[in-house]
């Protein structure tokens, strides 16, 4: 009986370690999550800020593997990321919208993390668009709104990233 209890205790400890490793891969100690979500196919995207030097890092992957990490090429990685937005009020009558993007370029691709709202149809979307800069082919990986943490609109007011003028709709 004691052996069975120990075995189940060990099982739950190992379960906690493996589920905790998901966060460890994509969110490191000393980092704060600015924006994150899970994709519809179970992967996770995070934009994190280092508490030590305020640099920003993008990570995309699964609990077992970080598929892409981008910390920027400058000493201050914040210079390699930009934020852009477009907002039109007026609700459905004016086709109101709020479009928000954080983007960077790496190895011939532009990565565009987006959070959008359109009043017509009360439509919200999050995800990441990957644009091949040579061919202009775009891959759109949609996120699950229920898993969203944070909001890109914070960048509009916190002056954390340079404001760009590119829109991606």
Image (spheres, rainbow, N blue to C red):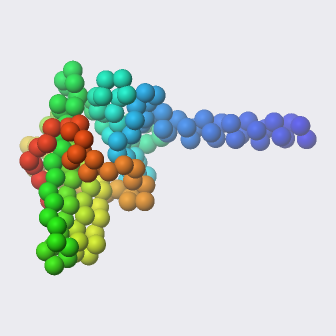
Say which of 87 and 45 sits in front. 87
Q: Residue at x 34, y 33 (%)?
A: 49
Quadrant of the rendering where the C terminus is positioned = bottom left
On-image quarter of the N terminus: top right
- Is residue 27 shown left or right of residue 118? right
List x then y, in percent, for residue 131: 16, 47
Question: Residue 106 at what x, y percent from top left?
Answer: 19, 35
Q: Against 156, is 70 above or below?
A: above
Asked if residue 37 lies left or right of residue 123, the reply is: right
Name the one closer to the observer, 91 or 99: 91
Q: Please name the residue shown 43% across and 59% down the image.
A: 146
Q: Position of residue 121 (x, y in %)?
A: 26, 76
Residue furthest toward the bottom?
Answer: 93
Number of numbered discs: 0
Above or below — where is 154 with respect to 28?
below
Q: Residue at x 20, y 61 (%)?
A: 98
Q: Quadrant of residue 72?
A: top left
Say which residue appears at 35% left-offset and 36% top-offset: 48
Relative to the observer, which residue lies in front, 51 or 58? 51
Q: Residue reaching furthest right?
A: 1
Any part of residue 165 in sight: yes
Relative to 102, 34 lies left or right: right
- Relative to the observer, which residue lies in front, 49 or 134? 49
**Which percent across, then down, holds residue 138?**
17, 53
Task: Establish if 37 lies above or below 53.
Answer: below
User: Is residue 141 visible in the rendered structure shown here?
Assistant: no
């Amino acid at each position: 009986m004691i052996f069975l209890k120990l075995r189940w205790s060990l099982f739950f400890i190992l379960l906690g370690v493996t589920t905790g490793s998901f966060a460890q891969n994509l969110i490191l100690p000393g980092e704060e999550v600015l924006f994150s979500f899970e994709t519809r196919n179970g992967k996770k995207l995070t934009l994190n800020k280092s508490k030590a030097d305020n640099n920003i890092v993008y990570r995309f992957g699964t609990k077992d593997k970080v598929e892409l990490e981008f910390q920027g090429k400058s000493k201050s990685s914040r210079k390699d990321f930009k934020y852009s937005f477009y907002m039109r009020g007026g609700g459905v009558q004016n086709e109101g919208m709020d479009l928000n993007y954080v983007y960077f370029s790496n190895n011939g691709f532009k990565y565009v993390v987006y959070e959008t709202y359109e009043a017509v149809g009360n439509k919200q979307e999050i995800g990441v668009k990957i644009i091949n800069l040579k061919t202009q082919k775009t891959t759109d990986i949609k996120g699950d709104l229920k898993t969203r943490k944070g909001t890109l609109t914070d960048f509009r007011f916190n002056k954390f990233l340079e404001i760009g003028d590119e829109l991606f709709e």
